[in-house]
Image: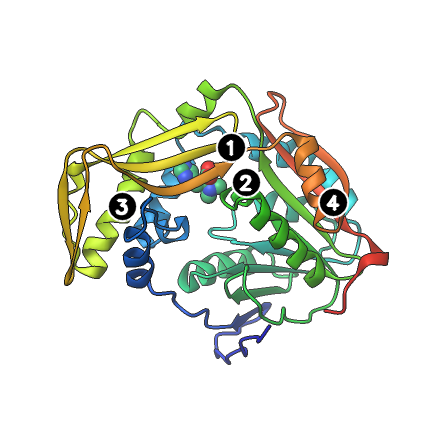
């Protein structure tokens, strides 16, 4: 795959280096128009995260019904020392989709002497602020902030230490299982010999508990979903009436996933620039899936991606899991 060259940023300071791969901004307009022209209307979930969407997602994580954040934090607090022992010495910790880098501090605290910390995020300013905070708090730690799309090809900066990736939050669940396997395989190649990956994965459980998490009483998740239409109004000059659509999130145990849609409350036409898109009453616009796994099923998926599955930690209520995968040395690729 062609890789994007790294830009010089002039932002380096002290123990902080900034590597900018200038991830291309995918066209929101093209994705919306293409997705709305399908028989089953859909917009990819990555477009939920503009600045307002990212703030709303942080708020979702604070809702009492949204158990994944709380449960994963508990795991990292309780088992941080054990996880650090599995990571071992001379490791650089690479965080995928680091956002505000909160959970990773629990791992950095537990690691005796990390060789470095490399947060990767597509959102440049968010990344810079979080990386600067960690670098200031930990003057002995080499922090390499990487602005890139972690699912795309780019040459990971070469810094000392074995590569250990941290992918928390069950973001892996927003891929379908085939995409998840391909994504893990890509990162296995990238991590190389001696590498490992720590992945947070939400578990299958009582559907009522899952449904509550995606339909919080304060309506934050609904606002997060509807922000996609508000974003289209702001950025594309679309004329979605937000009161014309309802957030609908439902866990399908057979598929093992939460399916999130915006449902048209009535028959309506929406103008987007020079296009008119028609919605029938009750018609659904798909905006996200969130897959849940049994620990065994995720271990099998990781093995199919070429990792050696090592161990898993759970919170006391068995709501969430954190898996430790290592790169089996006899299967290492050339990257
Ligand atoms: C980011 N991701 C793991 C969240 C999830 O639970 O699938 C996104 C989310 N959507 C609605 N609530 C949370």
- Mark 1 = which residue? 68
Q: Position of residue 166 (x, y in %)?
A: 63, 49
**Most foreground residue, 298 or 60:** 298
Gap in angstroms between the C-alphas marked 4 and 1 = 24 Å
**Above or below, comparing residue 102 to residue 129 in the picture:** above
Residue 325 % position (x, y) = 73, 46
Q: Earlier in the sequence, mark 2 or mark 4?
A: 2
Classify mark 2 as within 8 Å of ligand 1 or not, answering yes or no: yes
Task: Kindly indicate whether the residue at mark 1 contacts the one at mark 3 (C-beta within 8 angstroms).
Answer: no
Task: Using the image, determine if residue 161 lies above or below residue 37.
Answer: below
Quadrant location of the C terminus?
Answer: bottom right
Q: Where is residue 180 drawn, in percent x and y?
A: 59, 48
Q: Of the residues under marks 3 and 1, which one precedes in the sequence?
A: 1
Looking at marks 4 and 3 on the same chain, the residue that comes earlier in the sequence is marked by 3
Q: Within 8 Å of ligand 1, the CB of disc 1?
A: yes
Residue at disc 3, secondary structure: helix
Question: Which image quadrant for residue 244?
Answer: top left
Cβ of disc 4 within 8 Å of ligand 1?
no
Q: Which residue is mark 4?
A: 303
Whether pointer 1 and pointer 2 mark residues with C-beta atoms closer than 8 Å, the reply is: yes
| Residue lying at 50% horizontally and 79% vertically, measured from the top left | 7
Q: CA distance from mark 3 to mark 1?
A: 22 Å
Q: Are marks 2 and 4 in contact (CB under 8 Å)?
A: no
Graded by Cα atoms within 10 Å as few (under 14), some (14 to 19) or many (20 or more), the crowding at tag 4 reads some
Q: Which residue is mark 3?
A: 227
Q: What whole-number distance in Å separates the C-alpha atoms at marks 2 and 4?
A: 18 Å
Residue occupying the point 54% across, 40% down: 170
**Comparing labels 4 and 1, the label whose residue is closer to the camera:** 4
Of residues 143 and 200, the one nearer the viewer is 200
Name the quadrant where ligand 1 sits. top left
């Amino acid at each position: 795959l062609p890789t994007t060259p790294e830009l010089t940023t002039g932002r380096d300071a002290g123990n902080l280096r900034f590597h900018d791969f200038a991830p291309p901004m995918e066209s929101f307009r093209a994705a919306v128009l293409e997705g709305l022209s399908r028989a089953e209307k859909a917009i990819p979930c990555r477009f939920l995260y503009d600045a307002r969407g990212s703030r709303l997602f942080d708020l979702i994580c604070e809702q009492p019904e949204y158990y994944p954040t709380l449960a994963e934090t508990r795991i990292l607090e309780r088992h941080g020392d054990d996880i650090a022992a599995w990571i071992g010495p001379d490791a650089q910790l690479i965080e995928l989709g680091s956002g505000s880098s909160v959970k990773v501090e629990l791992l950095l605290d537990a690691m005796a002497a990390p060789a470095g910390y490399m947060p990767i995020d597509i959102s440049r300013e968010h990344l810079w602020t979080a990386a600067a905070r960690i670098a200031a708090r930990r003057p002995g730690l080499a922090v390499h902030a990487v602005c890139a799309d972690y699912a795309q090809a780019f040459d990971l900066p070469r810094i000392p230490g074995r590569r250990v990736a941290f992918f928390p939050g069950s973001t892996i669940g927003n891929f379908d299982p085939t995409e998840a396997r391909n994504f893990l395989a890509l990162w296995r190649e990238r991590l190389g010999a001696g590498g490992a990956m720590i992945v947070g994965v939400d578990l299958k459980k009582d559907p009522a508990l899952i449904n509550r998490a995606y339909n919080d009483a304060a309506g934050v998740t609904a606002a997060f979903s509807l922000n996609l239409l508000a974003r289209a109004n702001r950025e594309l000059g679309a004329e979605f009436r937000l009161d014309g659509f309802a957030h609908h999130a439902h866990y399908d145990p057979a598929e093992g996933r939460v399916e999130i849609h915006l449902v048209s409350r009535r028959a309506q036409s929406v103008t987007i620039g020079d296009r008119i898109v028609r919605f029938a009453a009750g018609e659904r616009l798909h905006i996200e899936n969130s897959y849940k796994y049994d620990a065994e099923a995720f271990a099998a998926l990781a093995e199919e991606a070429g990792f050696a599955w090592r161990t898993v930690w759970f919170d006391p209520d068995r709501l969430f899991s954190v898996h430790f995968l290592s790169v089996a040395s006899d299967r290492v690729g050339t990257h």
